[in-house]
Structures are given as structure tokens and as C-alpha cells.
Amino acid sequence: MRTAWTDSWRTVCQRHDLPLVKVPAIGWRWGDLTPTRRRVHAGLMHLPGALVPRLRRGWSELPLAIRRGAYALEIALLEAWAEQCAMGHPDAGEAVPGSRLRVWQDLLTLCSVSWGPLTEASLAGAALPARWVDRSAFLRVPRVAPLSPSTPAQLWRHWEDPAERRTLLLCVGDAVLGLSSERATQQHERRRPWGWPAVLPHLPETAMRWVLDRSEAWPVVFRYEAQNWLRIRKRTRVR
């Protein structure tokens, strides 16, 4: 079961339905910690189960759509990888034109690289209300990648923290599945939109043109979606 945690897109444990968290390891950074933090981390490594109740409480405080979405999106991404392998490309270097993995790859790149000289945070940060991120240890706005990676696996390896991967997965995955458009079930979810529609107004012109160009190699349904994103962006553009 633990080998599944090494899959680059995993951010939730399938068996326990709990978010994966970054566990401190003994290494060169260990010496930078205070003695108190070292004792806490050492205890966690010896008794990891002691942290589970706190993780469950914190995870349950996030909106239900986020908790369900994180798991559903991992399944969708896994299916896209399986489709890639079935098409005779198991190494999944450059995703095959017309495959769903190509959509994931391009959108991950879109939200991973810098589109301006001062960009420090990923566009995925606009997908979630700040209060969801600030109050949770399970969501974190990823920094932009220093270079433009060429494969999905390389993109994911840039973020060591599952909380950063989770935010990126929710953002890009919502563009693919449209979970944020489903009916809200909790009051605080209705107060503010989240997901891909919240990102579109922040897309720079160069980024939007790049997406439209890349969408020519997407499945037909996603090519139509890209044109719809352009219309939404024009209506809601942040100035």
C-alpha cells in the first residue's frame, strides 16, 4: 500500500481517506530545527498514529467538495495515465495528442511556470479562497517552477510538499472535471466561487494564447472548453 504514496500525483491515502502530509526526515535540515521541534518530529516518526486524530479534525474542517474532489481528481488523473499506456506510450514523456493526459500536462504547465517577471506564486493560488488555505495545513499555494518541465512527472517532482500538490491538483483537476460547478452543500461554500473559474480572470494574455494553441492537440470536448474559457476570461478579466 505504501508504494502508492510514491506515485507523483498522490495527495490522499486511499485506505484511510486522509491527506498525505510532509514528514520531516533526519538530514541536513534537521540541525536547523529547535530542540523542541526535533523532539516532536522524532516522536512523530516513532509513533505516526498519534497524529491521526488531529489530521482527521483538520481535514474535516475543509469544505466537503475539496475533500471529495482531492480523491476524485487523483482517480481521474490515474485514468488519464492508463489511457496513455493503452495507446502504446507507457513512458508518458510527451503526452499523446488527443489524450486526456495532454490536457493535464498542459494545464499543469500553465499553472507551474511564471508568466511575468515578478511571478512568485502559481496561478493555482487563485483557485481557492485564502481563508481555506490559511486555516489549513493541507493546502498551500505552490511556487512557480524555476524551469519549464516537459513531462507531468517532472512537473510533480518540483513540489515536495503534498499540500502544494493538492492545491495544484484541485485547480487543474477542476478545469478537467468541473467539480466547482456542482451544487454547493455547505453555506460557506456558496459565499465565494472556487476552482478553475476563479483562475481564468487572472490568466495573462500570453498564457491564454498559449492554452488555445496547445488545445489544438486536446480531445474535441476540451477544445470547446478552451474556447469557453476565453469567453469567461474576457467577461471577468482582472485589471
Image: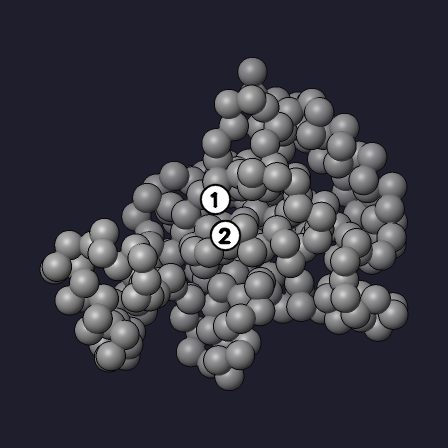
Kind of residue sitting beneath label 2: Trp
Q: Position of residue 74 (x, y in %)?
A: 59, 65
Q: Residue 222 or 64: which is nearer the viewer?
A: 222
Where is residue 197? Give x, y as percent.
60, 38
Q: Is residue 81 above or below residue 117?
A: below
- Residue at (31, 57) in percent of width and height: 28
Residue 6 visible: yes
| Residue 95 point in image, percent of width and height | 79, 56
Query: What residue occupies the far left of the structure in this picture?
Result: 36
Direction from residue 61 to residue 77 in the image, left or right: right
What residue is drawn where x is 41% and y is 47%? 140
* Left-right relation of 236 to 18: right
Mark 1 or 2, closer to the camera: 2
Say the numbered circle drawn on residue 169: none
At 66% from the left edge and 64% from the top edge, which residue is drawn?
Answer: 76
| On screen, residue 18 above or below 207 | below
Instruction: Determine the CA span between mark 1 and mark 2.
Output: 7 Å
Q: Amino acid at mark 1?
A: Pro
Please, what secondary structure does the residue beneath circle 1 have? Answer: loop
Q: Which mark sits nearer the N-terminus, 1 or 2?
A: 1
Q: In this rendering, does residue 193 appear at all?
A: no
Which residue, as the protein is rendered here, is positioned at the far bottom? 1
Q: How is the image coloured?
A: one colour
Q: Are marks 1 and 2 in contact (CB under 8 Å)?
A: yes
In the rendered image, which quarter contains the C terminus?
top right
Label 2 neighbour load within 10 Å: few <14, some 14-19, many 20+: some
SS for dot 2: loop
Q: Which residue is mark 2?
A: 159
The disc at residue 142 is 1
